[in-house]
Structure formats: structure tokens, C-alpha cells
Image (cartoon, grey):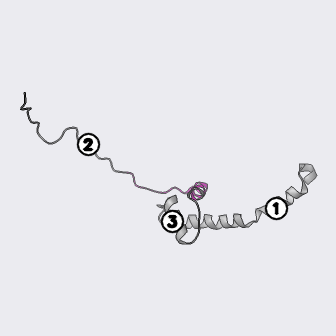
Amino acid sequence: MCKVLKILRSTYYDSIKRKDNKITKDDSNIERAVINIFNSNRKVFGTRRIENNLNDKGLTVSRRKIGRIMIKHNLVSVYTKAKYKNHQKETNEKRIKNLYY
């Protein structure tokens, strides 16, 4: 098979080893933790609050990594839109004549 694909045997076996390394196992644990925190908090938490929550649990994860996990799993935080406040065009006070002229 390696001859057909024109790759070295060492490359093939190295790639098999790399699939089950510790980093990928930790990443899957972190992904599950991020998804659980996000869903358990009514889908309101963003990357900063999830990071703080993970730090409290003893896991150190960067905000970028949490953001990538959220994008990968289509996790978008829900937030309320600010209510429109109408601005009055004129003030309620009456104009005072200029007494200097």
C-alpha cells in the first residue's frame, strides 16, 4: 500500500501512532466540557465566561481554542438586543430671548 501511495512506511506508522495521542484525548474532554458549560447555562455564556468556568474547574484553555470549539459545534451565544430609545428633536424647555441685543 505504501508503494502505491508513494509514501514511506515510517510515515504511515507514525500517522497511526499520532491519531491516538494524549493531546487529541484531552481536546475531546475539553470539547465536551465546553459544550456542557454552554448548554447548562442557557446558551448565554461566551468564550470569556466559559474560560473562567473552566479555570475554576482546573482546566487551562485559551479563549481562541474555546472560540474554535464553539464555531466547530455551531454554538452561538444568545443575547438580548438593546431596546431602541427615541431621541427628542427639541428640548422641553422654552427658549429665552437674548437680552444682550
4 with respect to 44 (left or right): right
The amino acid type, in three-letter code, at marker 1 is: Ile
93 with respect to 5 (left or right): left
Residue 15 position within the rendered picture, expressed as x and y whole percent measured from the top left: 81, 59
What are the residue bounds of the magenta stretch? 66-81
Q: What residue sits right under mark 3 in the picture?
A: 52
Q: Which mark is residue 87?
A: 2
Residue at mark 1 to residue at mark 2: CA–CA distance: 65 Å
Tag 1 near tag 2, CB within 8 Å: no
Question: Which of marks 2 and 1 precedes in the sequence?
Answer: 1
Instruction: Tell me which residue sits at (59%, 69%) in the image.
Output: 59
Label 3: how many residues lie within 10 Å, few (<14), some (14-19) or many (20+)?
some
Q: Is residue 75 magenta?
A: yes
Q: What residue sits right under mark 1 in the picture?
A: 16
Instruction: Tell me which residue sits at (49%, 62%) in the image.
Output: 49
Residue 65 position within the rendered picture, expressed as x and y whole percent measured from the top left: 60, 58
